[in-house]
Image (tube, grey):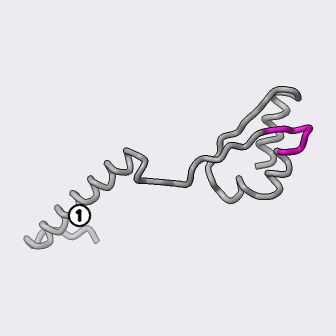
Amino acid sequence: MITVLYKLRSFYGIGKKLAVFWDNASYHRSPEVLLYANDPEIDIRIIRNVPYRPDFNGIELLWRSAKITFYKLVDSMRALGGRSWD
């Protein structure tokens, strides 16, 4: 990740304000990354995303509903002696 930060700083040059929006992967939070990003010569602000919350993500709710419907269908087929997908 330090390489990514270095390339960003090199591309935009010193003096430009930079912020990186990252998820909470452990390698994004490593002490080395934070130390590098906070170095006055690099000065890249790291903004962390909120922890993964599928209940706040509409597509996850849709997939949950689709899975429930699918498994009910599979259970019904099994009850009728239909094909199993196991």
Q: Is residue 39 magenta?
A: yes
Residue that numbered label 1 is attached to: 71
User: Is 18 located above or below residue 36 in the figure?
Assistant: above
Q: Is residue 6 magenta?
A: no
36 left or right, relative to 69? right
Query: Mark 1: few, some, or many residues within 10 Å (few <14, many ≥20)?
Result: few
- Residue at 65% x, 47% y is 48
- Residue at 34% x, 50% y is 61
Quarter of image, res 43:
top right
Regarding mark 1 in the picture, which secondary structure is present there?
Answer: helix
37 left or right, relative to 20? right
Image coordinates for residue 52, horizontal then vertical, percent: 52, 54
Quarter of image, res 26:
bottom right
Examine the residues drawn in magenta and state their main secondary structure: loop
Q: Nearer the viewer, residue 56 or 33?
A: 56
- Residue at 85% x, 32% y is 10
52 left or right, relative to 72? right
Image coordinates for residue 5, horizontal then vertical, percent: 79, 41
Disc 1 residue type?
Tyr
User: Is 25 located above or below residue 81 in the figure?
Assistant: above
- Residue at 72% x, 43% y is 46
User: Is 10 located above or below residue 39 in the figure?
Assistant: above
Query: How many numbered tags mark residues here?
Result: 1
Q: Nearer the viewer, residue 20 or 67?
A: 20
Q: Nearer the viewer, residue 49 or 60?
A: 49
| Picture quarter with the C terminus | bottom left
Residues in magenta, as a range: 38-44
